[in-house]
Amino acid sequence: MSQPTQEEELLAQQALAEAAATQTGSEITSGLSQGQIVRKRFFGHTGALIGLAVFVVIFLLAFTAVGAFGLPGWWKYNYLDVSPLVNDGAPTSSLWPFAWGEHPFGQDRIGRDLFAMTMRGAQQSITVMLLIGGIAGAIGAIIGGLAGYFRGWVEAILMRLTDVIIIIPLLLLAAVVGQIASRRDEGSWIAGFASSNSVVILGIFLGLVSWVGLARLVRGEFLTLREREFVDAARISGASNARIIFKHILPNAVGVLIVNVTLTMSAAILLETALSYLGLGVHSPDTSLGLLISQNQEAFATRPWLFWYPGLFIILICLSINFIGDGLRDAFDPRQKKFKAKSAVETTRQSSTTTAPLADTAQGS
Amino acid sequence: MTDNASPEPEATQLETASDKTAPGSVVLEVRDLSVDFGVEKKWIPAAIGLNYEVRAGEVLAIVGESGSGKSASSMALLDLLPSNSRVTGSVKLSGKELLGAKAGAIREVRGKDVAVIFQEPMTALNPVYTVGAQIVETIRLHNVVSPLEAKERALRMLELVELPDPEKAFKSYPHQLSGGQRQRAMIAQSLSCDPKLLIADEPTTALDVTVQAEILDLMRHLRNKLDSAIVLITHDMGVVADLADRIAVMRKGVIVETGTAQQIFSNPQHEYTQALLAAVPHLGQGADKADVDVTAALAAATNTELESVEHDELLRRERENQAALKAAAEEAAKPKGNPVLELIDVAIEYPKQGRVPAFRAVEGANLVIYPGQVVGLVGESGSGKTTIGRAAVGLLPVAAGSMRVVGQDISAAKRNGKQLREVRRDIGMVFQDPSSSLNPRLPIGESIGEPMFLAGVAKGVDLQKRIETLLDQVELPRGYRNRYPHELSGGQKQRVGIARALSLQPKLMVADEPTSALDVSVQAKVLELFQNLQKELGFACLFVTHDLAVVDVLADRICVMQRGRIVEQGTREQILRNPQEPYTQRLLAAVPLPDPEKQRERRELRAQLMAAGIE
């Protein structure tokens, strides 16, 4: 029964005034949906925009340069090709005068092009990231949602299941799966598929175990949302449980979901890197960013570029994803109001003398 | 300054004493105070060019609706606004400029010279410290005293605010006290450093009506005992009439009218003030029904004499009251048709959760509603009134007894089962908080249409037409149907709530405090709309509220609840003209009247009732 705060009232008044201004033109008004508002806020967030731009560039670069899904890329070398060493393998690119040269990122000891290998590695990392994000997001949302909405024994079972999965050491499981996936001698189709797409298997597997944190968050969100009156209202309207969960509650929890999925994604890249570094993820001759670093760490003193470029891409991908997640969190949280006093515009209060004496504007029309 | 002091001789003496010591030295002087909030790259004014002053021992009430800038301007005095705000002008406390002062200097003033009583005592007190520790902290921050001395002073303060057991209250944590006691503790804390200025920001809004009356009594006593200037911020004209010397009416950031309480109430000049006064629902003045003189009714029912009213005059008023009651009794026809809602010895429990045992919120409730009847369910918070409302629509299970809704016994119905779903086609419900009861992700048109869509009544173009008709009925423009809840004001949202409840043309409507979250003027309009719709569509209605004045406007019958039981029920006339239960009488007497004259009579009556109750 608390009174709305001053700011909220002001916001509402402002929204009304704006709506009234736009309404005069057209008969049917379409208000800003929550999604539109989030989009507007997101695109007003500089960090998130930069993150998004960087990610898009890396994504396009990685998937077009060396080719993917059986399509050839535009770069002249493949990550498997061995060519004679140029300039003892040092990077041929230079900033001034600007030139790519033959091997912009340099070559490794046996003459493979590092640019091609890095691009392949970035492909692998992004694939793992999207798989983990998608799978963990879907499972986490459904399990957390069911547990939070139904409570009772459903919640007890699902949450104990979550607890069990939380306590399994991820690294150990990953090692086992990595071993199975990399075994070529078994003739089964799974092994065949796994040997050619080991990173896909890794992504699916990691997705299947990393939803637990998300499920707990979504459950918490559902626990608060299910007590809101609009859920009761929907129930009185005759809505079924499924409709209440998916139509009424889930859209309101989507902010938490998206934000945490992006954070899981950036953690996933690091996980893949760590696993590959330990020799558990992707295996040679295929390559990934983590594998590149681990293979070349002894060469750090003599050929440091072999270490730098893959590292640079790991940092760029993780940072951009984190910035996007940060921007999304700010966009979904209505309490986040960025305000700069200097750039603010003066306004006069709209129509304080012309409106009806009482504030309920519905009456006027 | 008008002196509408309380009639107690003791208080009068104190007041004259204080008048002598401080013949109106100005404590607070506000000149050209403007407050702006930065919202989405724009400065939006919340208060514009305010000028007022408050003298020692005087109560200035700032009245206005939410969003009028009354709270923002007062918080600006102490620099308590968020960082996206801007304050200009001049605020002088006893001649010392407060605006633009250093943070350290402002901290000195806060709590010592200027104290604030907040709206929600639960959130304003820190739950992990005892009440005593918090008062001692305030005292020791501003005075060089030993802990023991501070404790003594804290105890004196708790005594001053009339807490029954100061020692115990000192050691209590906030959650161990009731709402009224917490507010008293809050007042004790704010008074602990003898502030020159006390800002009371909606001090009684979160409290029940009887508790509110007690706190108002306390504040009146304190004003007479202490010599502080008080700025009272409220939207409730009843509270203002009870306490204020002078009134400033604010609207959209501007003070539109100032004057003494007498001037404002008897002769309001500005149209907004007039509208605001007209919008306050007066207890005993239901629309197109005979006015009820509640004071007289109470006096008759309890055989009390009033000092402020002549004996003969009171007798005359009592007699008039009796006559009207008889007339009404003859007029009241037998209700017809089968009952829409019938409760027989119903008990309702909140089911146990984990280790928390089941809680029986309502016991032995008997209630019948016939078609077309509006029954008001009144009681304080925790009395179980909302519980009955929620059980009637099947949101809570019935533990014992039988509950029949539109002809079906739902006491044994399964949660979300088929029977309930059928029954719910004939029920509508309006919720208390309009901003929580609408899904923020659905356009309001969809929210309104959902019951019809789910019941399979209408689809496609037909559904859109029905939605438009409903929007017309609740007097909202059709173009609003694509809007989202956050784009509407509180009153408009509640209209949407009503439209949704009406969409299946229900036989029974359950309204759970539909206006308590709204401003007075908006409340008046929503109530009017509700009343018209009820007459037009003829649905039966269970109207749950804590506000007797609201139920008085609408209801044919009134049920009074206390601690999970219905203590008294009868027609509106019976309850208002001839209340039998002491609890009902107390409840009636506690409702503040937006008129200083009548309020004084009422206050005296209440004091006598309370005294009689204690004996």
Image (tube, grey):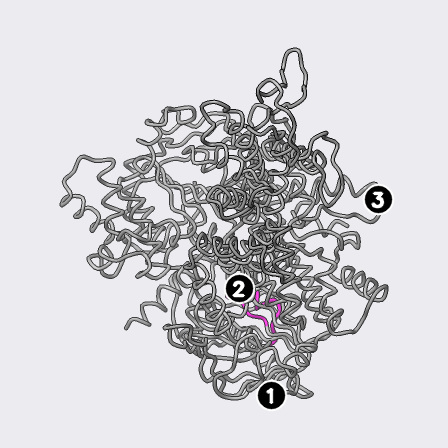
Q: Marks 2 and 3, how far apart in space?
A: 38 Å
Residue at mark 3: A26
Q: Secondary structure at mark 1?
A: strand
Q: Marks 3 and 1, how far apart in space?
A: 50 Å
Amino acid at pointer 1: Asp
Residue at mark 1: B409
Kindly give the residue lying farthest to the top in the view shown.
A97
Q: Marks 2 and 1, how far apart in space?
A: 26 Å
Amino acid at pointer 3: Ser
Q: Nearer the viewer, residue A313 or B197?
A: A313
Side (left or right) of A160 relative to A259: left
Looking at marks 2 and 3 on the same chain, the residue that comes earlier in the sequence is marked by: 3
Q: Position of residue A333 (x, y in %)?
A: 56, 45
Amino acid at pointer 2: Glu
Q: Is residue B546 covered in magenta?
A: yes
Q: Height in image: B385 above or below A271?
A: below
Which mark is drawn over residue A227?
A: 2
Q: Position of residue A364 (x, y in %)?
A: 74, 49
**Residue drawn at (67%, 88%), measured in percent from left and top?**
B338
Q: Is residue A85 covered in magenta?
A: no
What is the crowding at mark 3: few (fewer than 14 residues within 10 Å), some, or many (at least 20)? few
Q: Magenta span covers which residues? A: B543-556
Q: Secondary structure at mark 2?
A: loop
Q: Secondary structure at mark 3?
A: loop
Kindly give the residue lying farthest to the right in the view shown.
B461
What is the crowding at mark 1: few (fewer than 14 residues within 10 Å), some, or many (at least 20)? some
